[in-house]
Amino acid sequence: MAARIPYFRTRSERAAADQAKREYEQRRTVESETRRLYWTARWRAIAKDQLAREPLCATCLVEDRVTPATVCDHVEPHRGDVVAFWTNARQSLCTSCHSSAKQAEEAADRAGRGGG
Ligand SMILES: [Zn+2]
């Protein structure tokens, strides 16, 4: 059996760790609520309709590229809000534009929270 190595943290280190954990849990709970909505028949019908009406990637079109869209994306991020999930405007994106848009949003989120 391994010996226990004592590990002490200062009060403020503990508080910061607790705070980060709370924020993480809260965010995860809120996001998992909307993440499961992507698997509903309702969302699949919406996405299929969106891609049928706008079969080309909106971002690529702006840059004079013609790319088939594969993702139905929220123009304004819903940020875990169920009402926003169903009602926010949608656009068609290719996989590559979709993932770079999501990364930019997450970076903006982190900046908005004051880093971290
Ligand atoms: Zn694209």
Image (spheres, helix red, strand yellow):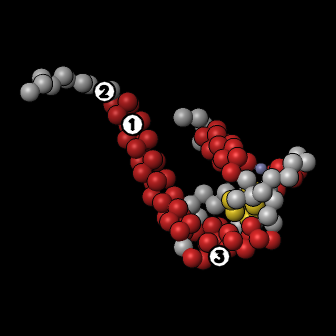
Label 2 or label 3, whichever comes before in sequence order: 2
Contact (Cβ within 8 Å) of mark 2 with mark 1: yes
Q: In screen coordinates, is 92 left or right of 12?
A: right
The image quarter containing residue 50 is: bottom right
Give the residue at x 74% y 67%. Answer: 51
Residue type marked 1: Ala
Instruction: Say which of 111 and 97 sits in front.
Output: 97
Residue occupied by mark 1: 17
Residue 13 percent coordinates (x, y): 38, 30
Residue type marked 2: Arg
**Distance from label 3 to label 1 (Cα)?**
42 Å
**Distance from label 2 to label 1 (Cα)?**
10 Å
Q: In screen coordinates, is 37 left or right of 49?
A: left
Q: Which dot marks residue 45?
A: 3
Q: Is residue 49 positioned above or below 108 on the image?
A: below
The quadrant of the picture occupied by the C terminus is top right
Give the residue at x 65% y 67%. Answer: 84
Label 2 or label 1, whichever comes before in sequence order: 2
Q: Is residue 112 positioned above or below 31 on the image?
A: above
Residue occupied by mark 2: 9
Label 2 CA crowd tier, 10 Å (few <14, some 14–19, many 20+): few
Instruction: Say which of 69 and 46 sits in front.
Output: 69
Residue type marked 3: Ala
